[in-house]
Amino acid sequence: MSEVVILIGIVAVILLFFNREWIKNRFFADKQKNYTIDDRFNSAKREREKEIDRLLGKMGKNGINDLSATDRKRLDKLSKM
């Protein structure tokens, strides 16, 4: 009886191994694949806002002189979007 259980276990492991891509796609699907255009826009907007907040926080400590030229250009570009 225990030999049958071991055999079933081995077969189950083999089946899981060869079907791992299907299992991954079925139960752990990529969330971004199902995004709508609005979801992508809002996600990009949140990322821009996070970067603006980071730059403004850096600037808030010592003023605008604390920002590098690259940071100033990036903040200017992000504020125009």
Image (cartoon, grey):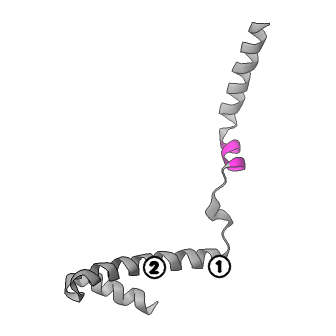
Viewer-proximal residue among 62 and 75: 62
- Quadrant housing residue 69: bottom left
First-in-chain label (1 vs 2):
1
Which residue is located at x 58 percent, y 79 percent? 41
Q: Secondary structure at mark 1?
A: helix
Distance of label 1 from label 2 (alpha carbons): 15 Å
**Residue that numbered label 1 is attached to:** 38
Seen in the image, is 28 located left or right of residue 48? right
Seen in the image, is 68 located left or right of residue 4? left
Q: Which mark is residue 48?
A: 2
Viewer-proximal residue among 62 and 13: 62
Residue 64: x %, y % from top left: 24, 88
Which residue is located at x 68 percent, y 26 percent? 13
Number of other residues with Cα within 10 Å of mark 2, as a class: few under 14, some 14 to 19, many 20 or more? some
Seen in the picture, residue 16 relative to 57 is either above or below; the reply is above
Residue type for callout 1: Asp
- Quadrant housing residue 11: top right
Taking the view exactly as shown, the residue that stands out farthest to the front is: 61
Residue 35 in magenta stretch: no
Q: Which residues are magenta?
A: 21-27
Which residue is located at x 65 percent, y 77 percent? 37
Magenta part, dominant SS: helix
Viewer-proximal residue among 17 and 44: 44
Residue 35: x %, y % from top left: 66, 69
Residue type for callout 2: Arg
Seen in the image, is 21 located left or right of residue 76? right
Q: Which mark is residue 68?
A: none
Seen in the picture, residue 81 relative to 18 is either above or below; the reply is below
